[in-house]
Every structure is written in structure tokens, then in C-alpha cells.
């Protein structure tokens, strides 16, 4: 009835938070030692995950512009889209997951569209 649990490096997904701008490395107050990275610096964090042998990352975006329908979530030049293209160019074998929640893209902060 009791079974030991084991977690391997292959089981992990490394969170990466990307933000608009240049030279930006902002610590997230509610998560000590976790940072928001601008695209020019994000490779440093991705390299750390790869060096640790973590096979997957998830990209969370912090867009500069938000609106009521979260349009930067599906815009070709959105922060997450640009980050994924950049990461995959350097690490084609890395599994990259995109956060699909709209809350960070909407000006009202809800996870969906509001009428």
C-alpha cells in the first residue's frame, strides 16, 4: 500500500519567465531566486537548465502591452513567441512548453475573455 516515490531529472520542467526590454533580470518577490529575464539575457537561464540535465522548460511571458482580449498571446511578435523561437534555435532538442493561460496578457488579469 505504500510505495516510494522517486523524482529524476528527466521528470522536471524548468520555469522560465521572459519580460520585454533589454538587460532586465528582475527577481520575482514571491519566488526568491527566480527571475524574469529579458530576451537578451534569457539564454543564461536556459543554459543553466540544460547544464543540469533538465529536458524541458515552460515559458511564461510578461508582455509590455496588455488588452482586454490578450492579443499579445497570439501575436507573431509576442514575448513568448519570440522567446520560444530564440530558445529552439539554440536548443532544438529541448522540449519547450508555452503557458497558454491568458491572465498575463489581459489588462483585467482574468484567465479568459470577459464580456
Image (cartoon, rainbow, N blue to C red):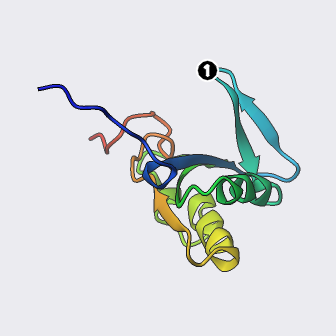
Is disc 1 surrounded by few (<14), some (14 to 19) or many (20+) residues within 10 Å?
few
Mark 1 lies on a secondary structure that is loop
Residue lying farthest right? 23
Question: x, y percentage for residue 16?
Answer: 61, 48
Residue lying farthest left? 1
In the image, is residue 47 above or below residue 108?
below
Question: x, y percentage for residue 64?
Answer: 67, 47
Write down the quadrant of residue 35 in the picture.
top right
Horizontal side of residue 74 vs 60, given as left or right: left
Q: Nearer the viewer, residue 18 or 33?
A: 33
Residue for point 46% across, 60% down: 97
Write down the quadrant of residue 30 in the picture.
top right
Quarter of the image where the C terminus is located: top left
Question: x, y percentage for residue 13?
Answer: 49, 50
Residue for point 57% across, 55% down: 54
Q: Report the label total.
A: 1
Quarter of the image where the N terminus is located: top left
Q: Nearer the viewer, residue 2 or 95?
A: 2
Q: Nearer the viewer, residue 7 or 32?
A: 7
Horizontal side of residue 45 vs 93, given as left or right: right
Horizontal side of residue 55 vs 44, given as left or right: left
Residue for point 70% across, 76% down: 90
On the question of residue 85 being in view, the answer is yes
Horizontal side of residue 72 vs 17, given as left or right: left
On the question of residue 65 being in view, the answer is no
From the image, tell me which residue sits under label 1.
30
Amino acid at each position: 500500500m505504500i510505495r516510494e516515490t522517486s523524482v529524476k531529472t528527466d521528470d522536471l520542467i524548468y520555469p522560465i519567465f521572459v519580460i520585454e526590454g533589454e538587460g532586465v533580470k528582475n527577481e520575482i518577490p514571491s519566488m526568491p531566486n527566480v527571475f524574469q529575464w529579458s530576451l537578451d539575457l534569457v539564454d543564461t537561464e536556459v543554459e543553466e537548465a540544460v547544464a543540469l540535465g533538465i529536458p524541458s522548460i515552460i515559458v511564461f511571458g510578461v508582455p509590455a502591452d496588455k488588452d482586454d482580449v490578450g492579443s499579445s498571446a497570439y501575436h507573431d511578435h509576442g514575448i513568448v513567441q519570440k522567446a520560444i523561437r530564440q530558445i529552439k534555435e539554440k536548443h532544438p532538442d529541448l522540449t519547450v512548453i508555452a503557458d497558454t493561460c491568458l491572465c498575463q496578457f489581459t489588462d483585467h488579469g482574468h484567465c479568459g475573455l470577459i464580456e
